[in-house]
Image (cartoon, rainbow, N blue to C red):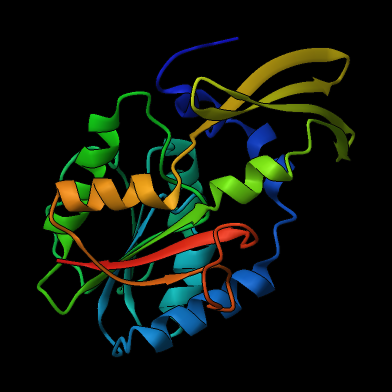
């Protein structure tokens, strides 16, 4: 198994990654973002950063609501694809979230577990520093949408096979050395490829410690995309609304 810190650089750039996850529920995601911008009381023409935007589907939707959106992602392949949707108020850039942003934003969205990839805590903390520095002022907000680790481990599906577009994905999951590991064996055209995903087991307490380290203020916490109250035992998600 490749143990590179930057495992996501190769996996996220593959067509296999997008095939495996292409059936995610767009309707649910759009309802979630609509509720978010309403809760945050964002105004038309506010500038939003969609950090780890993938191929841009959520950036496009946010832009359709009237916001000035920049989608940023490490994967150049994803950014190249997303650029077909660009207009005067929607732009896409290749960007590593560990690097600072040149622009200030009214809101920064880091959605669908695009955090906690790094072995060293200092790299996760550096991402939060960059998010803080990217916020325009104390009235600006960042949203981090993470898994609820406690619930995820309790309900871990250790083995499954998914077939999509004549491609077989054999997936195994485990908890190792403080990470939830997903090993993905891909079988396509009689060829076998091996990838993995790794997300740090950051519970609510640990993330709060991160926020305190960079002096970010926790404004609200939700446990699902309907913005229901967070329950560490049973919630599927850990949604953090933070500000300077």
Q: Relative to the observer, which residue lies in front, 119 or 104?
A: 119
Q: Quadrant of the C terminus?
A: bottom left
Which residue is at 44% across, 85% downward?
65
Q: Relative to the observer, which residue lies in front, 39 or 22?
A: 39
Q: Relative to the observer, which residue lies in front, 159 or 37?
A: 159
User: Is 227 positioned to the left or the right of 175 in the image?
Assistant: left
Question: How far across and how far down the image is residue 29, in percent?
Answer: 60, 69
Q: Quadrant of the N terminus?
A: top right
Question: How far across and how far down the image is residue 73, in percent?
Answer: 39, 45
Question: How far across and how far down the image is residue 233, in percent?
Answer: 61, 57
Q: Where 27 sits versus 17, above or below?
A: below
Q: Quadrant of residue 137?
A: bottom left
Q: Where 106 sits versus 194, above or below?
A: below
Number of on-image labels = 0
Q: Where 24 sits versus 36, above or below?
A: above
Q: Relative to the observer, which residue lies in front, 178 or 96?
A: 178
User: Is 28 positioned to the left or the right of 197 in the image?
Assistant: right
Which residue is at 14% across, 49% downward?
214
Q: Quadrant of residue 186?
A: top right
Question: How far across and how far down the image is residue 77, in percent?
Answer: 48, 38
Which residue is at 83% across, 23% downward?
188
């Amino acid at each position: 198994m490749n143990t590179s810190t930057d495992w996501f650089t190769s996996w996220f750039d593959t067509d296999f990654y997008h095939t495996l996850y292409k059936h995610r529920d767009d309707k649910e995601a759009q309802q979630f973002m609509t509720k978010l911008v309403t809760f945050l009381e964002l105004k038309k023409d506010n500038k939003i950063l969609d950090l780890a935007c993938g191929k841009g589907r959520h950036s496009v939707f946010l832009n359709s609501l009237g916001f000035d959106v920049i989608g940023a992602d490490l994967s150049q392949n994803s950014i190249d694809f997303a650029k077909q949707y660009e207009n005067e108020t929607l732009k896409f850039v290749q960007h590593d979230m560990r690097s600072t942003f040149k622009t200030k934003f009214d809101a920064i969205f880091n959605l669908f577990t695009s955090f906690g990839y790094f072995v060293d805590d200092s790299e996760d903390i550096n991402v939060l520093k960059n998010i803080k520095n990217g916020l325009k002022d104390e009235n600006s907000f960042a949203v981090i949408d993470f898994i609820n680790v406690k619930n995820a481990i309790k309900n871990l599906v250790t083995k499954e096979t998914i077939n999509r577009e004549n491609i077989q994905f054999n997936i195994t999951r485990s908890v190792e050395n403080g990470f939830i590991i997903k090993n993905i064996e891909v079988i396509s055209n009689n060829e076998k490829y091996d990838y993995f995903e790794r997300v740090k087991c950051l519970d609510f307490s640990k993330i709060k410690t991160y926020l305190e380290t960079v002096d970010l203020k926790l404004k609200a916490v939700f446990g699902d995309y309907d913005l229901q109250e967070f329950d560490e035992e049973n919630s599927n998600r850990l949604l953090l609304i933070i500000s300077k």
